[in-house]
Amino acid sequence: MKVNPDSLPPSISHFKARLVAQGDSQTKGINFDEVYTPIIRFTSLRIILHIAATFDLEIVQEDFVNAFLNGKLSEKGIYITQLEGFEDPDHPDWVCELHGNIYGLRQGARVWYECLDTVLRTYGMTRTEADQVLWLKILVFLLAHVDDILIVENKNETAGIKAYLSSAFKFKDLGDAHHFLGLVITRDRKNR
């Protein structure tokens, strides 16, 4: 269930269902090696919002649809049991081998992050060393927190990065940012 962030009490936006792996049954060194995924530093977020206010840049928010499903697993031999209702009665002990990423895997967030990083670097963006979920390209800033992103840029450039991202991923354009990571974003553009 996804809730609307701007209502009290929160109202239901929509319901969602996902196939989720039992990552707790994975073994380090066998099913995965690296699980670390960087997250936004609030200092970076505040600085980028300050730059947007100072230079009157657009702040738009995007939400990737089923983000984790975009990544490909580098590990081989990751299996899940047959899905309930899809079991083969002749072979009840059969399992399904995963080739792509799904929710619930221990390395799932890392695989998605690497996929997003590859696409953004192909677009010509550079990841910063100080905050590895902040990518830059001449007054274009992109901050990612798992599957939610903020794009801060000049109004003329917004269409370019959105078009590029939509060629690689399916996402929902949430328009001007109003809520991000529990923060409420309001703007007084006249006074910057």
Image (cartoon, helix red, strand yellow):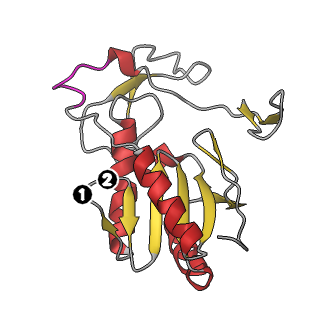
Image position, residue 183 (x, y; %): 62, 43
- Magenta span has 28? yes
Q: Is residue 8 above or below residue 134?
A: above
Q: Which residues are magenta?
A: 26-32
Q: Secondary structure at mark 2?
A: loop
Question: What label sits on residue 129 in the rendered view?
Answer: 1
Residue displayed at 33% across by 34% down: 107
Residue situated in front as seen by the camera: 22 or 36: 36
In the drawing, does residue 62 fall left or right of residue 129? right
Label 1 element class:
loop
Q: Quadrant of the C terminus?
A: bottom right
In the current view of this chain or complex, which residue is farthest to the front? 191
Q: Amino acid at mark 1?
A: Glu
Do residues under tags 1 and 2 come within 8 Å of each other at their CB atoms? yes
**Residue most toward the left?**
29
Residue type at numbered disc 2: Gln
